[in-house]
Image (tube, rainbow, N blue to C red):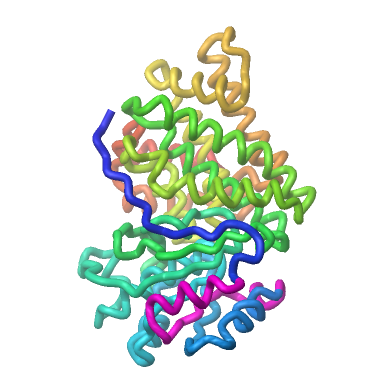
């Protein structure tokens, strides 16, 4: 068991109608010039944009806008946002959307105080020494970016998708209203839930044992995703289901469950390469990769953790052999991802071949994780996904 420091300074307003009277007051704490960052315009279709404008109308806040943030946010969009922040001397960023918008906003916030290309933050050329405060309004339960200090950005020029964590990027305030996720499509809801589940699995499957208490929390979080995602898919405006998924999204990756398991992850590096080369939805890539990774790393040394996973998450009879429980658990996970969620179960269906597998594995290098993986191991896992 490791020592740790836990500090999550994000203030959360959870539930319906929390914007009223609170959004403008929170923004005013940081200044008067606000950059509103959002994606393709869905916030206008669901009426959220109008609510925000109405809430800020009678305040002393001056609003600037940056729209069009991509699903796998580009470093070019981050650079554009940083340019606006410098030109208009922005005081605070209001990120409205899913994880992509919030991720982009984090590095826009840091870019305000850096004169070069913000991609330098990801290549080791520049440190993040300061960042504008960020307030976010979440519209998709998935990445957990609303309550953590990390983000992932894509560079299409170099076909790279890289992440960065820095305490300066921690959002100050998050507005989490489950009703803002009612209109999220079945596909994006499913991908978001696969992403949430992956965040927990990546931490749960650790080489070293950690706190029993945190393992049980993670098991509860995984059971929550498995229980409520099918309900959200069949009843898009089911508040209980959407609320449970939204809060699970935040707690899956805000540092709490991995407090004494700060190990690096296995499936995310593999998926980032897939997204970098093929621009696929992050959650979908994880849904395809995770069961194959599980099958590849299951052995006599790792079976105990899979047994625990099967018994405590999928309620498999603990009297069965550990190997049988482990294999059943992986099969049930596949059934959840591909049948219950309806996600594509292989890369071939996405017109992805093994053309770049060698290059992708070379860039990843060796992964010293739950099970050590070398270049050949990574290629083999990719091939299992075809």
Question: How many marks overall?
Answer: 0
From the viewer's perspective, is residue 329 above or below residue 47? above
Q: Nearer the viewer, residue 226 or 278?
A: 226
Which residue lies at the image location 46% right of the left edge and 50% below the top edge? 271
Q: Nearer the viewer, residue 102 or 336?
A: 102
Q: Nearer the viewer, residue 123 or 89?
A: 89
From the viewer's perspective, is residue 246 above or below residue 314? below
- The image quadrant that residue 53 belongs to is bottom right
Quadrant of image for the C terminus? top right
Q: Is residue 336 magenta?
A: no
Quadrant of image for the N terminus? top left
Which residue lies at the image location 50% right of the left edge and 43% below the top edge? 198
Q: Is residue 43 magenta?
A: yes
Residue located farthest toward the right when viewing the structure as drawn: 234
Q: Position of residue 261 (x, y in %)?
A: 33, 36
Q: Position of residue 55 (x, y in %)?
A: 60, 80
Horizontal placement of 236 versus 219: left or right? right
- The image quadrant that residue 182 belongs to is bottom right
Which region of the structure is painted magenta? 20-46
Horizontal placement of 261 versus 105: left or right? left
Which residue lies at the image location 29% right of the left edge and 60% below the top edge? 166
Q: Nearer the viewer, residue 332 or 353?
A: 332
Q: Position of residue 202 (x, y in %)?
A: 43, 39
Q: Position of residue 153 (x, y in %)?
A: 41, 65
Which residue lies at the image location 31% right of the left edge and 80% below the top edge? 112
């Amino acid at each position: 068991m490791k020592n740790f420091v836990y500090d999550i300074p994000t203030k959360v307003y959870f539930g319906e109608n929390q914007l009223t009277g609170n959004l403008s007051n929170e923004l005013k704490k940081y200044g008067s010039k606000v950059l509103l960052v959002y994606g393709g315009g869905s916030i206008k279709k669901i009426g959220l944009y109008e609510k925000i404008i109405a809430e800020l109308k009678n305040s002393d806040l001056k609003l600037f806008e940056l729209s069009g943030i991509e699903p796998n946010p580009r470093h070019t969009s981050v650079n554009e946002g940083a340019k606006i922040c410098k030109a208009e001397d922005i005081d605070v960023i209001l990120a409205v959307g899913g994880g992509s918008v919030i991720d982009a906003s984090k590095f826009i916030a840091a870019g305000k105080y850096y004169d070069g290309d913000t991609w330098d933050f990801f290549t080791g050329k520049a440190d993040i020494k300061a960042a504008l405060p960020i307030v976010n309004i979440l519209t998709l339960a998935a990445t957990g970016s609303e309550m953590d200090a990390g983000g992932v950005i894509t560079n299409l020029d170099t076909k790279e998708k890289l992440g960065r964590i820095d305490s300066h990027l921690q959002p100050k305030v998050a507005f989490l209203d489950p009703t803002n996720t009612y209109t999220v499509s079945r596909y994006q809801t499913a991908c978001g839930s696969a992403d949430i589940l992956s965040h927990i699995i990546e931490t749960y499957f650790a080489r070293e044992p950690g706190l029993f208490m945190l393992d049980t929390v993670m098991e509860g979080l995984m059971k929550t995703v498995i229980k409520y995602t099918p309900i959200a898919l069949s009843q898009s405006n089911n508040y209980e289901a959407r609320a449970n998924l939204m809060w699970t999204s935040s707690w899956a990756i805000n540092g709490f469950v991995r407090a004494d398991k700060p190990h690096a992850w296995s499936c995310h590096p593999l998926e980032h390469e897939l997204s970098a080369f093929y621009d696929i939805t992050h959650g979908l890539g994880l849904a395809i990769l995770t069961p194959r990774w599980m099958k590849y790393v299951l052995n006599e040394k790792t079976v105990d953790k899979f047994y625990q996973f099967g018994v405590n998450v999928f309620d498999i009879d603990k009297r069965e052999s550990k190997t049988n429980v482990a294999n059943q658990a992986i099969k049930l996970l596949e059934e959840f991802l591909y049948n219950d969620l309806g996600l594509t179960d292989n890369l071939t269906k996405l017109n992805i071949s093994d053309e770049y597998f060698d290059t992708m594995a070379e860039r990843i290098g060796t992964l010293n994780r739950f099970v050590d993986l070398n270049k050949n191991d990574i290629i083999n896992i990719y091939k299992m996904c075809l």
